Image (cartoon, grey):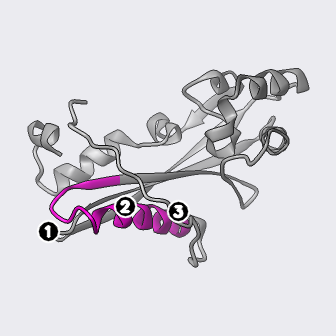
Amino acid sequence: MGFQLQIKSKDIEEISDKVEIVEQIKDISLKKVMAVAVENPKEFVVGADTVVVIDGKILGKPKSEMDAEKMLKSLSGKNHEVITAYTLINLEKNIKITNSVESTVYFKQISDEEIKWYIKSGEPMDKAGAYGIQGLGSIFVDKIDGDFFAIMGFPINHFIKTLNNLKIPIESLNKI
């Protein structure tokens, strides 16, 4: 996209006291970005958080291979929601925006052999819901309703619309 980025991260406790799941994810996104923004008040700071939700339960990143297997089995043959929240902050310019994008992913029935093969690849271990739609996990997806890039982890089109609403021209993006 031409962005000139510096990758900075802070360890934060990814918890929220918000009641609604979407509000929880937005709150965590805000906390992640604010932790970096306070040390970089003149810079535009962007961050995101993505979760998978099935039957009202949030699936984060698996803690073990057994956890990944349990998650994949719970998703097998069903649809689930993927919620990605992103935050844009520039403290000096008094900009603080948090938005979210929700999409629905429909999974095929996954065999035990496919689950074992996928876990052995290592790919699910750092992904919310134990799969990456942009990688090997794509074989489980029958269809999606929503934004592919939000499911992948960052809704770039939605983000660009946010920048446009802020009157930040697209040609200046390489400076953000």
User: Within 10 Å of the Cα at label 2, are there few (<14), some (14-19), or many (20+) other Cα atoms?
Assistant: many
Query: What residue is drawn where x is 56% and y is 73%?
Result: 16
The answer to whether residue 38 is magenta is: yes
151 in relation to 36, above or below = above
Taking the image as shown, residue 116 lies to the left or right of residue 52, namely: right
**Is the residue under label 1 in contact with that under label 3 (CB below 8 Å)?**
no
Residue 98 location in percent, x, y? 36, 63
Name the quarter where the N terminus is drawn.
top left
Mark with earlier residue (3, 2): 3
Frontmost of labels 3 and 2 is 2
Q: Which residue is mark 1?
A: 92
* Mark pair 3, 1: CA separation: 25 Å
Residue 50 location in percent, x, y? 53, 50
Query: What residue is drawn where x is 12% and y is 50%?
Result: 168
Q: Amino acid at mark 1?
A: Glu
Dot label at residue 33: 2
Magenta stretch: give its range: 23-46
Residue 73 location in percent, x, y? 84, 39
Q: Nearer the viewer, residue 100 or 31?
A: 31
Q: Nearer the viewer, residue 126 or 29?
A: 126
Magenta: main secondary structure: helix
Tag 2 secondary structure: helix
Q: Amino acid at mark 3?
A: Ile
* Mark pair 3, 2: CA separation: 12 Å
Frontmost of labels 3 and 1 is 1
2 in relation to 8, above or below = above
Q: Which residue is mark 3?
A: 25
Q: Amino acid at mark 2?
A: Val
